[in-house]
Image: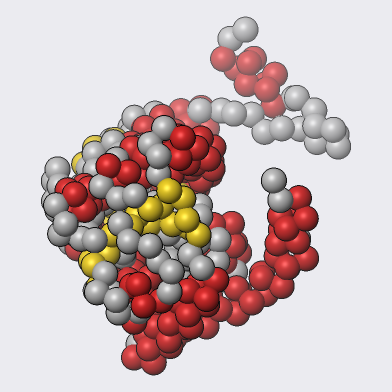
Amino acid sequence: MNKLKRRDFIKKIPLAGGAFVAGCASPQETNAPAIHTGKTYEWKMVTTWPPHFPILGETADNLAKWIGEMSNGRLKIQVYGGGELIPPLEGFDAVSQGIAEMCHGASYYWAGKAPATQFFAAVPFGMNSQQMNAWITSGGGQALWEELYAPFNLIPMPAGSTGFQMGGWFNREINTIADFQGLKMRMPGLGGKVLSKAGGSAVLSAGGEIFTNLERGVIDATEWIGPYHDYLMGFYKAAKYYYYPGWHEPGTIIELIVNKQALESLPKDLQAIVRAAAARASVWALAEFESKNNTYLQKLITEKGVQLKKFPDPVLKTLRQYAQEVVDEVIASDAMSKKVYTSFNDFRKNVSAWADVSEKIYYTSISG
Ligand code: CA
């Protein structure tokens, strides 16, 4: 079949409704503008994670791989783990200034740039992963997130989630709220401010530094993520009590930030590929966390002798009061935080009422 006949053949494939599919003619045949310009782009992605770190660093690696595959090599992304190109918590500035085109991280690391960033990562006693995704994707969160980042020349998008986290590693029991007094604990974001209200002192450090700090007594306690990562980090060697629930991070969203000019300078199909890869990362990362956490929780308990403990209910109740005070203080001093939190909280109330008659009652009824 020669080229002309093949095109005619394709044009005549009937659809169910009796219409005909347009032929998939190449640009040379139709004089249509070329979609594939052949131009290749080479970008840098920095991350807040240690290089190739399980799930999180792997998500960054996968983003680069998927974008390369989907673009047939037209958009090549070199991934730099935290500290390889720039210090791990300087990705916001680096992408804002165009030193790198992308950063994979979590928005609460940028609270010093704009306090409202924290609401797009984790809010103590806030929403879980699927509720956060619902707010961002379908509840107005994405537009607010873009509005917040626009002055920094950045476009944010969700690109992963950790699911529910654990409460952290301690060498002292937490029996009452007073047990947080004087406790120096690694905890980012709004959760860290709640800890300060309870008399502790919050330290923000990137993942690669935590174990050494805990082992050397630079910090007394730490939270990190959940059983899979906490097992791999070896925290059980430096702390004996493993507390739940992770009240401070009930469903942390991982973000991809892209330099606005860089993204907008790409052909439309490559822009769509970046967004599609981020969406795939959101599904992949959460699936990885959910599939691994219990296996590693059991390993920690049975193989490593870790003592699993629940924060007492009165402690959680007090922490929740403090969490509301922290949020009230943030929104009282920053108009954008107020705007974002109002949207967040309205959505949370609405989705919580649904959860009360769906997941909450379901888990209670079928526990075990
Ligand atoms: Ca955490």
Residue at 38%, 53% in the rendered image: 241
**Residue 4, visible in the rendered structure:** yes
Q: Position of residue 77 (x, y in %)?
A: 28, 38
Q: Is residue 20 left or right of residue 269?
A: right
The vertical placement of 78 against 320, above or below, is above
Residue at 64%, 15% in the rendered image: 5
Q: Position of residue 186 (x, y in %)?
A: 27, 62
> Where, by quadrant of the figure, is residue 183 drawn?
bottom left
**Residue 269, visible in the rendered structure:** no
> Where, by quadrant of the figure, is residue 219 drawn?
bottom left
Residue at 25%, 47% in the rendered image: 238
Residue at 50%, 52% in the rendered image: 163
Q: Position of residue 317 (x, y in %)?
A: 52, 77
Q: Is residue 31 left or right of residue 257?
A: right
How many numbered circles are shown?
0
Q: Which residue, as the protein is rendered here, is positioned at the far bottom?
A: 332
Q: Nearer the viewer, residue 319 or 20?
A: 319
Q: Position of residue 244 (x, y in %)?
A: 48, 58
Q: Nearer the viewer, residue 112 or 31?
A: 112
Q: Nearer the viewer, residue 167 or 310?
A: 310
Q: Nearer the viewer, residue 260 or 306?
A: 306
